[in-house]
């Protein structure tokens, strides 16, 4: 542990809800500047893993380091886009306010946001194609638009590491393209982006790192090394029918067909 060359380091992480372990003895070493998918079946513990790295869930055991230090000391380096379903969209607030809230932590709660913060928020909203919606109430946006607003909010945090929980959930193809372009831009700037991802078909196209979990860590590393048919079987059991399709596109997933 304590390697400050790594963006995220997780050691022996165990998390339980009501005494039932949902993550067991997880180790992860993530270098900076990667775009990493976290994949695994429903209930595998993907959201819990992100939440425990962010200190939102208290682990039963283990240690998490962000650039070599505990999260509490590195909060300003971390941006988080939660699952859309976990946010109260009826909260009466405008698009611009939601994005400016992303700056509060950097500003401190005492100082009111001013023109600079407004400009930064506007810039981020333009970047995600939401510049025309600044005064709209967040409850009056489509799912894809809400997701873009939350991305803009993360962007203004100007973090080094981003955690995004299913950012492609319920968005149309255009929004998905816009989001992946943005994530690639972040990576090009040397940021680390960690994404809980459901669509196994797009893992090799979108990501360069992947972590497969199912309560335990199955594999973690480059997509070439870790996203193998064997590891997918370990994570998903027999339910990997997509492989017969996938296999045509990529040799990484092994040679066997799965019916
Ligand atoms: P994933 O994101 O991979 O679908 P989660 O991390 O959401 O999985 O959940 C992992 C397991 O923990 C599931 O069995 C889920 O039912 C359980 N779980 C998640 N949150 C809670 C909670 N707040 N209280 C009790 N159990 C929970």
Image (cartoon, grey):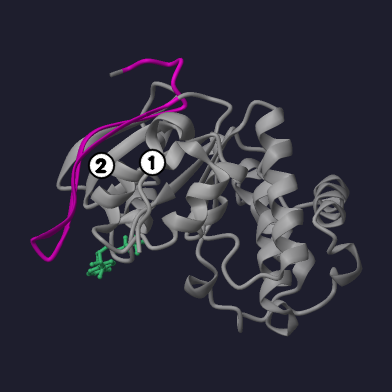
| Side of 64 relative to 82 (left or right) | left
| Side of 230 relative to 77 (left or right) | left
Task: Count up the numbered dots.
Answer: 2
Q: Position of residue 232 (x, y in %)?
A: 33, 49
Q: Which of the marked residues, 1 or 2, is nearer the chain's N terminus? A: 1
Quick one: label 1, few (<14), some, or many (20+) residues within 10 Å? many
* Magenta stretch encompasses residue 23: yes
Q: Position of residue 157 (x, y in %)?
A: 66, 44
Q: Is residue 39 visible?
A: yes
Q: Residue furthest right?
A: 132
Quickly name the residue at label 2.
Answer: 217
Q: Residue at x 50, y 52 (%)?
A: 246
Q: Quadrant of ligand 1?
A: bottom left
Q: Which quadrant would the C terminus be assigned to in this image?
A: bottom left
Q: Which mark is residue 211?
A: 1
Q: Residue at x 85, y 68 (%)?
A: 134
Q: Identify which residue, 96 or 7, lies in the foreground.
A: 7
Magenta: main secondary structure equals: strand
Q: Is residue 56 visible?
A: no
Tell me: residue 26, above or below residue 134: above
Give the residues drawn in magenta, as a range.
Answer: 2-30
Q: CA distance from mark 1 to mark 2?
A: 8 Å
| Side of 95 relative to 43 (left or right) | right
Q: Position of residue 230 (x, y in %)?
A: 29, 42
Tell me: residue 208, above or below residue 3: below
Q: Position of residue 154 (x, y in %)?
A: 64, 50
Q: Which quadrant would the N terminus be assigned to in this image?
A: top left
Determine the secondary structure under disc 2: strand
* Magenta stretch encompasses residue 174: no
| Side of 103 relative to 193 (left or right) | right
Marks 1 & 2, CB-CB < 8 Å contact: yes
């Amino acid at each position: 542990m304590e390697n400050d060359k790594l963006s995220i380091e997780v050691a022996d992480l165990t998390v339980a809800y009501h005494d039932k372990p949902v993550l067991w003895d997880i180790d992860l070493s993530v270098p900076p500047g990667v775009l990493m998918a976290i994949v695994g079946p429903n209930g595998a513990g993907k959201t819990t893993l992100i939440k425990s790295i962010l200190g939102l869930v208290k682990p039963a055991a283990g240690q998490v380091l962000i650039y070599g230090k505990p999260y509490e000391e590195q909060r300003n380096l971390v941006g988080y886009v939660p699952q859309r379903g976990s946010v109260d969209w009826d909260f009466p607030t405008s698009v611009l306010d939601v994005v400016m809230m992303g700056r509060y932590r950097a500003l401190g709660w005492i100082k009111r946001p001013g023109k600079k913060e407004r400009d930064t928020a506007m810039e981020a909203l333009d970047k995600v194609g939401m510049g025309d919606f600044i005064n709209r109430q967040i409850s009056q946006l489509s799912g894809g638009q809400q997701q873009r607003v939350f991305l803009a909010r993360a962007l203004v945090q100007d973090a080094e590491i981003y955690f995004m929980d299913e950012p492609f959930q319920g968005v149309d193809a255009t929004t998905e393209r816009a989001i992946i372009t943005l994530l690639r831009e972040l990576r090009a700037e040397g940021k680390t982006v960690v994404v809980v991802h459901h669509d196994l078909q797009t893992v090799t196209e979108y990501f360069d790192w992947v972590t497969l979990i199912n309560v335990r860590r199955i594999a973690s590393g480059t997509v070439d090394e870790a996203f193998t048919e064997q590891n997918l079987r370990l994570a998903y059991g027999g339910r990997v029918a997509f492989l017969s399709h996938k296999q045509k596109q990529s040799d990484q997933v092994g040679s066997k067909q799965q019916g």
